[in-house]
Image (spheres, helix red, strand yellow):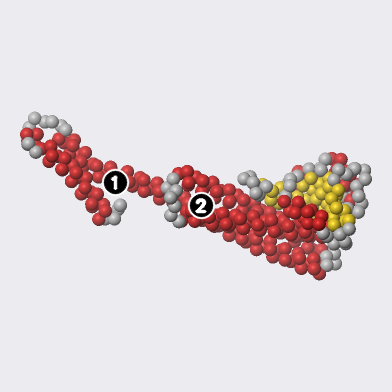
Protein backbone atom coordinates (compact mmCIF):
# COMPACT_ATOMS: atom_id res chain seq x y z
CA UNK A 1 0.00 0.00 0.00
CA UNK A 2 1.30 3.45 -0.96
CA UNK A 3 0.40 6.51 1.11
CA UNK A 4 1.54 10.08 0.47
CA UNK A 5 1.46 12.94 2.97
CA UNK A 6 1.14 16.44 1.57
CA UNK A 7 1.33 19.70 3.60
CA UNK A 8 -2.06 21.42 3.46
CA UNK A 9 -3.16 24.43 5.59
CA UNK A 10 -1.01 23.68 8.60
CA UNK A 11 -1.66 19.93 8.52
CA UNK A 12 -0.18 16.93 6.79
CA UNK A 13 -2.90 15.53 4.60
CA UNK A 14 -2.91 11.79 4.03
CA UNK A 15 -3.66 10.63 0.49
CA UNK A 16 -4.46 6.98 -0.17
CA UNK A 17 -5.43 5.09 -3.33
CA UNK A 18 -3.00 7.09 -5.42
CA UNK A 19 -2.59 6.69 -9.12
CA UNK A 20 0.91 5.36 -9.70
CA UNK A 21 1.26 7.64 -12.71
CA UNK A 22 0.39 10.79 -10.77
CA UNK A 23 2.17 10.80 -7.44
CA UNK A 24 2.04 14.25 -5.81
CA UNK A 25 5.49 15.84 -6.21
CA UNK A 26 4.82 18.10 -3.20
CA UNK A 27 4.58 15.09 -0.85
CA UNK A 28 7.12 15.31 1.98
CA UNK A 29 6.49 11.78 3.28
CA UNK A 30 5.81 8.71 1.20
CA UNK A 31 4.97 5.59 3.18
CA UNK A 32 5.25 2.19 1.49
CA UNK A 33 3.63 -0.65 3.45
CA UNK A 34 4.16 -4.06 1.87
CA UNK A 35 4.69 -2.37 -1.50
CA UNK A 36 3.97 -4.02 -4.81
CA UNK A 37 6.57 -3.91 -7.63
CA UNK A 38 4.51 -1.23 -9.39
CA UNK A 39 4.48 0.99 -6.31
CA UNK A 40 8.23 0.57 -5.91
CA UNK A 41 8.81 1.66 -9.50
CA UNK A 42 6.50 4.67 -9.20
CA UNK A 43 8.28 5.96 -6.08
CA UNK A 44 11.68 5.32 -7.60
CA UNK A 45 10.66 7.37 -10.65
CA UNK A 46 9.35 10.26 -8.54
CA UNK A 47 12.15 10.44 -5.97
CA UNK A 48 15.03 9.16 -8.09
CA UNK A 49 16.12 6.46 -5.66
CA UNK A 50 16.10 2.69 -5.50
CA UNK A 51 13.69 1.05 -3.05
CA UNK A 52 15.36 -1.81 -1.11
CA UNK A 53 13.75 -5.24 -1.18
CA UNK A 54 12.51 -7.03 1.91
CA UNK A 55 15.53 -9.31 1.79
CA UNK A 56 17.83 -6.28 1.72
CA UNK A 57 16.08 -4.82 4.75
CA UNK A 58 16.61 -8.00 6.75
CA UNK A 59 20.39 -7.89 6.38
CA UNK A 60 22.06 -7.45 9.76
CA UNK A 61 25.44 -6.00 8.81
CA UNK A 62 25.79 -2.26 9.34
CA UNK A 63 26.96 -1.58 5.78
CA UNK A 64 23.66 -2.96 4.46
CA UNK A 65 21.53 -1.01 6.92
CA UNK A 66 23.17 2.41 6.95
CA UNK A 67 24.58 3.79 3.71
CA UNK A 68 24.41 6.65 1.22
CA UNK A 69 23.43 6.13 -2.39
CA UNK A 70 22.57 8.76 -5.03
CA UNK A 71 22.75 11.50 -2.39
CA UNK A 72 20.04 9.74 -0.34
CA UNK A 73 20.57 8.28 3.12
CA UNK A 74 19.28 4.73 3.57
CA UNK A 75 18.68 3.83 7.22
CA UNK A 76 17.13 0.57 8.40
CA UNK A 77 16.11 0.08 12.02
CA UNK A 78 14.39 -2.71 13.92
CA UNK A 79 11.08 -1.58 15.43
CA UNK A 80 8.65 -3.23 17.83
CA UNK A 81 5.22 -4.42 16.71
CA UNK A 82 2.17 -5.89 18.45
CA UNK A 83 3.59 -5.25 21.93
CA UNK A 84 0.08 -5.03 23.40
CA UNK A 85 -0.68 -8.56 22.22
CA UNK A 86 0.62 -11.85 23.55
CA UNK A 87 3.08 -12.23 20.68
CA UNK A 88 5.29 -9.12 20.31
CA UNK A 89 7.62 -9.11 17.34
CA UNK A 90 10.21 -6.97 15.63
CA UNK A 91 10.23 -5.76 12.04
CA UNK A 92 12.83 -3.95 9.91
CA UNK A 93 11.81 -0.48 8.68
CA UNK A 94 13.82 1.49 6.14
CA UNK A 95 13.94 5.29 6.22
CA UNK A 96 15.18 6.92 3.01
CA UNK A 97 15.99 10.60 3.46
CA UNK A 98 16.47 12.79 0.38
CA UNK A 99 16.82 16.57 0.09
CA UNK A 100 13.33 17.41 1.39
CA UNK A 101 11.41 14.14 1.33
CA UNK A 102 11.22 11.04 3.51
CA UNK A 103 10.34 7.61 2.12
CA UNK A 104 9.59 4.79 4.56
CA UNK A 105 9.41 1.13 3.60
CA UNK A 106 7.87 -1.40 5.98
CA UNK A 107 6.08 -4.73 6.07
CA UNK A 108 4.26 -4.39 9.38
CA UNK A 109 2.40 -1.80 11.45
CA UNK A 110 4.61 -0.25 14.15
CA UNK A 111 2.46 1.91 16.40
CA UNK A 112 4.69 5.05 16.13
CA UNK A 113 3.68 5.39 12.47
CA UNK A 114 0.00 5.66 13.40
CA UNK A 115 0.78 8.09 16.22
CA UNK A 116 2.92 10.40 14.09
CA UNK A 117 0.48 10.33 11.18
CA UNK A 118 -2.36 11.28 13.52
CA UNK A 119 -0.33 14.00 15.19
CA UNK A 120 0.74 15.65 11.92
CA UNK A 121 -2.79 15.34 10.54
CA UNK A 122 -3.96 17.63 13.34
CA UNK A 123 -1.18 20.18 13.23
CA UNK A 124 2.23 20.66 11.64
CA UNK A 125 4.54 23.47 10.58
CA UNK A 126 3.85 25.04 7.22
CA UNK A 127 7.49 24.50 6.25
CA UNK A 128 7.53 20.82 7.20
CA UNK A 129 9.92 18.55 5.30
CA UNK A 130 10.95 14.95 5.44
CA UNK A 131 13.58 15.87 8.02
CA UNK A 132 10.89 16.95 10.50
CA UNK A 133 8.86 13.80 9.85
CA UNK A 134 11.92 11.63 10.46
CA UNK A 135 12.61 13.35 13.77
CA UNK A 136 8.99 12.91 14.86
CA UNK A 137 9.07 9.21 13.91
CA UNK A 138 12.32 8.58 15.78
CA UNK A 139 11.04 10.43 18.82
CA UNK A 140 7.83 8.36 18.78
CA UNK A 141 9.82 5.12 18.44
CA UNK A 142 11.97 6.00 21.46
CA UNK A 143 8.90 6.95 23.52
CA UNK A 144 7.22 3.70 22.54
CA UNK A 145 10.24 1.62 23.58
CA UNK A 146 10.37 3.51 26.89
CA UNK A 147 6.69 2.72 27.57
CA UNK A 148 7.28 -0.96 26.81
CA UNK A 149 10.23 -1.10 29.21
CA UNK A 150 8.21 0.63 31.93
CA UNK A 151 5.41 -1.92 31.65
CA UNK A 152 7.87 -4.80 31.52
CA UNK A 153 9.61 -3.50 34.65
CA UNK A 154 6.29 -3.28 36.50
CA UNK A 155 5.40 -6.84 35.44
CA UNK A 156 8.79 -8.13 36.62
CA UNK A 157 8.30 -6.41 39.99
CA UNK A 158 4.88 -8.07 40.29
CA UNK A 159 6.37 -11.49 39.56
CA UNK A 160 9.14 -10.84 42.07
CA UNK A 161 6.55 -10.09 44.74
CA UNK A 162 4.74 -13.34 43.99
CA UNK A 163 7.98 -15.26 44.51
CA UNK A 164 9.32 -13.60 47.65
CA UNK A 165 6.10 -12.73 49.48
CA UNK A 166 3.88 -15.37 51.15
CA UNK A 167 0.89 -16.32 49.07
CA UNK A 168 -2.02 -18.72 49.36
CA UNK A 169 -1.08 -20.19 46.00
CA UNK A 170 2.52 -20.82 46.92
CA UNK A 171 3.57 -24.39 46.47
CA UNK A 172 1.26 -25.16 43.55
CA UNK A 173 2.93 -26.42 40.40
CA UNK A 174 0.37 -24.54 38.28
CA UNK A 175 1.34 -21.23 39.90
CA UNK A 176 5.04 -21.91 39.36
CA UNK A 177 4.53 -22.80 35.71
CA UNK A 178 2.57 -19.58 35.13
CA UNK A 179 5.29 -17.50 36.79
CA UNK A 180 7.99 -19.16 34.70
CA UNK A 181 5.94 -18.50 31.56
CA UNK A 182 5.61 -14.81 32.45
CA UNK A 183 9.33 -14.52 33.18
CA UNK A 184 10.16 -16.09 29.83
CA UNK A 185 7.84 -13.76 27.92
CA UNK A 186 9.16 -10.65 29.66
CA UNK A 187 12.75 -11.70 29.02
CA UNK A 188 12.00 -12.16 25.33
CA UNK A 189 10.19 -8.79 25.17
CA UNK A 190 13.02 -6.88 26.86
CA UNK A 191 15.58 -8.51 24.55
CA UNK A 192 13.57 -7.41 21.51
CA UNK A 193 13.29 -3.85 22.84
CA UNK A 194 17.03 -3.73 23.45
CA UNK A 195 17.64 -4.91 19.89
CA UNK A 196 15.35 -2.13 18.65
CA UNK A 197 17.10 0.51 20.76
CA UNK A 198 20.55 -0.52 19.54
CA UNK A 199 19.46 -0.24 15.90
CA UNK A 200 17.73 3.11 16.49
CA UNK A 201 20.82 4.43 18.28
CA UNK A 202 23.00 3.52 15.30
CA UNK A 203 20.53 5.17 12.95
CA UNK A 204 20.55 8.41 14.95
CA UNK A 205 24.34 8.45 15.05
CA UNK A 206 24.43 7.92 11.29
CA UNK A 207 21.93 10.63 10.40
CA UNK A 208 23.37 13.07 12.94
CA UNK A 209 26.69 13.08 11.06
CA UNK A 210 25.16 15.72 8.82
CA UNK A 211 24.91 18.10 11.77
CA UNK A 212 28.38 19.27 10.82
CA UNK A 213 27.55 20.28 7.24
CA UNK A 214 24.72 22.67 8.06
CA UNK A 215 21.76 20.46 7.10
CA UNK A 216 20.19 20.52 10.56
CA UNK A 217 19.20 23.59 12.54
CA UNK A 218 20.47 24.29 16.04
CA UNK A 219 17.21 23.03 17.55
CA UNK A 220 17.36 19.81 15.53
CA UNK A 221 20.94 19.21 16.61
CA UNK A 222 19.82 19.53 20.23
CA UNK A 223 16.99 17.08 19.55
CA UNK A 224 19.41 14.51 18.13
CA UNK A 225 21.69 14.83 21.15
CA UNK A 226 18.71 14.35 23.45
CA UNK A 227 17.63 11.28 21.47
CA UNK A 228 21.10 9.79 21.72
CA UNK A 229 21.11 10.26 25.49
CA UNK A 230 17.61 8.78 25.76
CA UNK A 231 18.54 5.76 23.67
CA UNK A 232 21.67 5.17 25.74
CA UNK A 233 19.77 5.43 29.02
CA UNK A 234 17.00 3.13 27.77
CA UNK A 235 19.57 0.62 26.52
CA UNK A 236 21.18 0.62 29.97
CA UNK A 237 17.75 0.18 31.56
CA UNK A 238 16.98 -2.73 29.24
CA UNK A 239 20.26 -4.37 30.27
CA UNK A 240 19.31 -3.82 33.91
CA UNK A 241 15.91 -5.42 33.32
CA UNK A 242 17.56 -8.38 31.60
CA UNK A 243 19.77 -8.90 34.66
CA UNK A 244 16.78 -8.54 36.97
CA UNK A 245 14.78 -11.05 34.94
CA UNK A 246 17.68 -13.49 35.14
CA UNK A 247 17.81 -12.98 38.93
CA UNK A 248 14.05 -13.54 39.25
CA UNK A 249 14.33 -16.66 37.09
CA UNK A 250 17.14 -18.03 39.26
CA UNK A 251 15.13 -17.23 42.39
CA UNK A 252 12.07 -18.96 40.96
CA UNK A 253 14.06 -22.08 40.13
CA UNK A 254 15.57 -21.96 43.63
CA UNK A 255 12.11 -21.84 45.20
CA UNK A 256 10.99 -24.78 43.09
CA UNK A 257 14.07 -26.74 44.19
CA UNK A 258 13.39 -25.92 47.83
CA UNK A 259 9.80 -27.10 47.52
CA UNK A 260 10.95 -30.32 45.91
CA UNK A 261 13.62 -30.84 48.58
CA UNK A 262 11.04 -30.32 51.34
CA UNK A 263 8.81 -32.96 49.78
CA UNK A 264 11.68 -35.42 49.44
CA UNK A 265 12.79 -34.68 53.01
CA UNK A 266 9.29 -35.38 54.30
CA UNK A 267 9.21 -38.76 52.59
CA UNK A 268 12.70 -39.58 53.86
CA UNK A 269 11.80 -38.69 57.47
CA UNK A 270 8.58 -40.69 57.31
CA UNK A 271 10.49 -43.71 56.02
CA UNK A 272 13.00 -43.45 58.90
CA UNK A 273 10.26 -42.90 61.49
CA UNK A 274 8.27 -45.94 60.33
CA UNK A 275 11.29 -48.21 60.02
CA UNK A 276 11.52 -49.26 63.75
CA UNK A 277 7.76 -50.03 64.06
CA UNK A 278 8.02 -52.05 60.86
CA UNK A 279 10.94 -53.99 62.34
CA UNK A 280 8.98 -54.79 65.51
CA UNK A 281 5.91 -55.83 63.54
CA UNK A 282 8.08 -58.01 61.32
CA UNK A 283 9.67 -59.76 64.31
CA UNK A 284 6.37 -60.58 65.97
CA UNK A 285 4.83 -61.55 62.66
CA UNK A 286 7.21 -64.47 62.25
CA UNK A 287 5.12 -66.70 64.63
CA UNK A 288 7.95 -68.99 65.76
CA UNK A 289 6.81 -71.59 68.32
CA UNK A 290 9.51 -70.74 70.90
CA UNK A 291 8.89 -66.97 70.99
CA UNK A 292 8.07 -66.33 74.71
CA UNK A 293 6.16 -63.11 74.05
CA UNK A 294 3.48 -65.04 72.13
CA UNK A 295 2.24 -66.52 75.42
CA UNK A 296 2.02 -63.21 77.26
CA UNK A 297 -1.47 -62.03 78.10
CA UNK A 298 -0.41 -58.43 77.46
CA UNK A 299 1.89 -59.23 74.53
CA UNK A 300 -0.27 -57.51 71.90
CA UNK A 301 -0.58 -54.16 73.76
CA UNK A 302 3.14 -54.40 74.55
CA UNK A 303 3.99 -54.74 70.82
CA UNK A 304 1.73 -51.83 69.91
CA UNK A 305 3.29 -49.61 72.57
CA UNK A 306 6.76 -50.63 71.41
CA UNK A 307 5.92 -49.67 67.82
CA UNK A 308 4.47 -46.29 68.86
CA UNK A 309 7.49 -45.58 71.05
CA UNK A 310 9.86 -46.61 68.25
CA UNK A 311 8.11 -44.12 65.93
CA UNK A 312 7.95 -41.24 68.42
CA UNK A 313 11.57 -41.38 69.59
CA UNK A 314 13.12 -40.76 66.11
CA UNK A 315 10.63 -37.93 65.50
CA UNK A 316 11.53 -36.25 68.80
CA UNK A 317 15.23 -36.70 68.04
CA UNK A 318 14.83 -35.07 64.59
CA UNK A 319 12.94 -32.14 66.10
CA UNK A 320 15.63 -31.71 68.75
CA UNK A 321 18.30 -31.63 66.06
CA UNK A 322 16.11 -29.15 64.09
CA UNK A 323 16.12 -31.38 61.05
CA UNK A 324 12.36 -30.87 60.75
- Find residue 99 and report its horizontal and vertical position in percent: 88, 58
- Who is closer to the viewer here, 312 or 250? 312
- Answer left or right for 49 relative to 143: right
- Who is closer to the viewer here, 126 or 295? 126
Of labels 2 and 1, earlier in sequence is 2
- Find residue 52 and report its horizontal and vertical position in percent: 81, 46
Q: What element carries label 2?
A: helix
Confirm whether residue 244 shows in the render.
yes
Figure quadrant of the N terminus? top right
Q: Residue 219 carries which label?
A: none
Q: Which residue is drawn at 20% across and 49% down?
A: 313
- Find residue 20 and report its horizontal and vertical position in percent: 90, 43
Q: Residue at x 64, y 55 (%)?
A: 148
Q: Quadrant of residue 222?
A: bottom right
- Find residue 58 and report its horizontal and vertical position in percent: 73, 46
Q: Residue at x 89, y 58 (%)?
A: 9
The residues tagged by marks 2 and 1 sit, at their Cα atoms, a distance apart of 30 Å
Q: Is mark 1 on a helix, strand or loop?
A: helix
Q: Which mark is residue 269?
A: 1
Say if 152 sits above or below 208 in the image: above
Q: Residue at x 25, y 45 (%)?
A: 273
- Who is closer to the viewer here, 174 or 53? 174
Q: Mark 2 points at which residue?
A: 249
Within-10-Å neighbours for mark 1: few <14, some 14–19, many 20+: some
Within-10-Å neighbours for mark 2: few <14, some 14–19, many 20+: many
Q: How many labels does the image show?
A: 2
Q: Quadrant of residue 218?
A: bottom right
Task: Please report contact status of discs 2 and 1: CB closer than 8 Å, yes or no.
Answer: no
Amino acid sequence: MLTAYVPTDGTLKRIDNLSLDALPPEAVWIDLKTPSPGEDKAVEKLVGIEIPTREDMQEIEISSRLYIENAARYMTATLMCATDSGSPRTTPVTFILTDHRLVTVRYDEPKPFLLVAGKLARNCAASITGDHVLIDLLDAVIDRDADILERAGADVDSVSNQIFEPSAERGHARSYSQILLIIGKKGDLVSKVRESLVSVGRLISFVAVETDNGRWSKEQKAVFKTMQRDVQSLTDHASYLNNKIQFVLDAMLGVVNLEQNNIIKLFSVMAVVLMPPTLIASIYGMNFKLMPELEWSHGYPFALCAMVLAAVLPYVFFKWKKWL
